[in-house]
Amino acid sequence: MYHTERSLRAVFYLLGTSQLVSAQFGTENWGNGKTAPWGLTYADFESSLEYANATGTFSVPGPDISRPYPASTIDGWSWSILVTADMAISNSTSENTQNEYGGKFFTGSELNFNAPPSLRSNSQNVSVDSSWKVCVMRWDIMGDAEYPEALRGDDGTCHSVLSPECTQNIEKAAIELSANSTDCSCPDVRKACGDEDGLAVLAQRGCSSQSFNATKIQQWPDGRFVLQQFGGNPHEKDNITAYNETGSIAWPVMVVWAQGKLSAGGHALPMNNTAKMSCVRAKDGANGSAAPGITGMGENSGYRNERSLFVAVFMTAICGAWSIRLF
């Protein structure tokens, strides 16, 4: 095991690394509200995601919002993520970006919150009663604190870095805030969990939230809300290290279902708001690729489709060579 780890570190050095865990990211990585990351049009970005190298879907319990608040829980709510390697910056609509990075590529991802298929009409609009609101929250993890490597292997609960008690306290705090506000407010994670070590990645930059009333929920295209699109830093084509590092990020998010307005007669119903915190990552390979990850090679990390098969062979050869030299 020791020699294998030394071999992998040597390969990372040879191929280069984006140093994601400590990097600062700007508008180019997230898009500017008019274009997708690195100046791609939304159409080009979405088109690349149709051939994703990795995906992940995580179910979350949620209410039947087609019925008046409060309502029973139904299946079908979920978070999903798509990751595609080697999106071409040459497709950027930004002349400055083209001039500086035109020959480079990046690993792109999209994070979606999905309503149950049972709540979608023939037109794919979500069926929702006017008494509901939904709050969607995302923690900005791209700060100075080191990204927890354990989070890259999280099972969707965030328990790889946070205790079950901590996540429950965060959810409870969010529920209490949603009951006292007409909008959405992110909970204070330090107040909820004290000084747990895993909180650094959540507390360093804070949290952003978005509130959706019934009308806005109905307008989610195909019953999904695109929470974010992200593009890693530029790299050469077939840089498997960049794919592994960017693609294996788990994103801490939370959704709160709450009463959106007073019931008939102007009296508030007893609070029956619910919340669920998740850490969403691309855990499954797709289209002939392996899921991203930085803890090993072979079947556990790196992409393996027609665009990059030679990279896998090259990495295997290099790993073997360094294993022999470092033995």
Image (cartoon, rainbow, N blue to C red):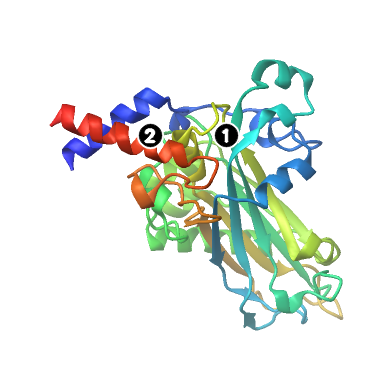
Q: Mark 2 points at which residue?
A: 314
Q: Is residue 141 among the parts visible in the rendering?
A: yes
Q: Residue 16 or 166: which is nearer the viewer? A: 16
Quadrant of residue 116 in the image?
Answer: bottom right
- Residue pictured at 58% horizontal, 66% vertical: 275
Residue 46 in the image: above or below residue 38: below
Q: In this view, does 227 lie to the left or right of 240?
A: right
- Residue pictured at 58% horizontal, 57% vertical: 254
Question: Considering the numbered disc 1 on the image, is that residue within a helix, a strand or a loop?
Answer: loop
Q: Residue 174 or 37: which is nearer the viewer? A: 37
Q: Where is residue 24 in the image (x, y as percent from the top left)?
A: 54, 27
Task: Please tell me whether mark 1 or mark 2 is closer to you in this view.
Answer: 2
Q: Where is residue 235 in the image (x, y as percent from the top left)?
A: 54, 27
Please, what is the three-letter code of the amino acid marked with disc 2? Phe
Q: Position of residue 228 (x, y in %)?
A: 67, 46
Residue 175 in the image: above or below residue 23: below
Residue 116 in the image: above or below residue 241: below
- Residue pictured at 73% horizontal, 61% vertical: 224
Specify the quadrant that holds the N terminus: top left
Specify the quadrant that holds the C terminus: top left
Q: CB of mark 1 within 8 Å of CB of mark 2?
A: no
At label 2, counting other C-alpha atoms closer than 10 Å, the crowd grade (few under 14, some 14-19, many 20 or more) is few
Q: Is residue 292 left or right of residue 210?
A: left
At label 1, counting other C-alpha atoms closer than 10 Å, the crowd grade (few under 14, some 14-19, many 20 or more) is many
Q: Is residue 195 among the parts visible in the rendering?
A: no
Q: Where is residue 256 in the image (x, y as percent from the top left)?
A: 64, 63
Q: Name the residue under label 1.
A: 232
C-alpha separation, residue under disc 1 versus residue under disc 2: 23 Å
Which of the two discs, 1 and 2, labels the residue nearer the N terminus?
Answer: 1
Please, what is the three-letter code of the amino acid marked with disc 1? Gly
